[in-house]
Image: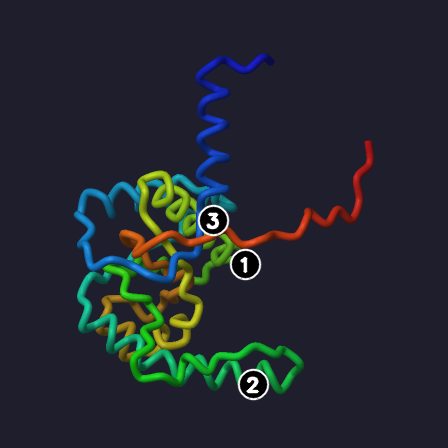
Amino acid sequence: MPLTALDRSLRKNTLEAINARRSVRSYRPDELERSTIQTLLEAAVRAPTAMHEEPWAFVVIQDQALLKRLSDLAKPLFVEEARHRTVHGHSHSFDHFTRPDFNIFHGADTLIIICARPTSQFVAADCWLAAENLMLAATAAGLGSCVIGSAVAALNIHKVKAELGIPDDYSAIAPVVVGVPGGETTATSRKEPKILFWKK
């Protein structure tokens, strides 16, 4: 089936957003409007989902004092996890996590936590697909985003979940910060696709 001009335009815009997406780690203090965040959430829930579960639920935090407190709680937990991984053969320096002034959320205005109940083996994948939709929508809107995996352990502590309104039977799966970039983030290189098998 031949592509229409509109189809070609949409395809180009999608690839442009994919190629323009960066893990932004510097943000201006500009506050995102509720309508902007709602648009990102609406993009997130358009993600593919196994078994039609649509398992996701969202927590949105724009309170800088709370984000700082969560960062301070998360850093030592993540460093301990990182040291454990290093012992088992993974080498990476996480020394910056021990600095008091380092904020794992990079000064972003907004943290969006994608949560779900672990009802099936595909729930985590569904949530990460939603996260990718959200980040591509943010890129298309001129915003920056970054996955904050170092926050996951802290966000799943019982008292933290209670404070953030996350029910006991839900888990925080995909934390993503979003905001106005504080500058340009250069593209990182990527390996060529590794093809294990291709039969025609």
Can you tell which of label 3 and label 1 is closer to the viewer?
3
Q: Is residue 102 left or right of residue 28?
A: right
Name the residue: 50% across, 27% down: 11
- State the residue lying farthest toward the right: 199
Q: Which of the 4 image quadrants contains residue 141?
A: top left
Can you tell which of label 3 and label 2 is closer to the viewer?
2
Q: Amino acid at mark 1?
A: Gln
- Residue pointed to by mark 1: 121
Q: Amino acid at mark 2?
A: His
Mark 3 or 1, nearer chain start: 1
* Above or below, comparing residue 107 to residue 68 in the picture: above
Within 10 angstroms of label 3, few (less than 14), some, or many (20 or more) residues?
Answer: some
Mark 1 or 2, nearer chain start: 2
- Residue pointed to by mark 2: 84
The location of residue 162, given as percent across then percent down, is 25, 73
Q: Looking at the picture, tell me which residue is in the foreground, 70 or 42.
A: 70
The location of residue 200, given as percent across then percent down, is 82, 31
- Residue pointed to by mark 3: 129
Within 10 angstroms of label 1, few (less than 14), some, or many (20 or more) residues?
Answer: few
Which color scheme does this rendered protein use?
Answer: rainbow
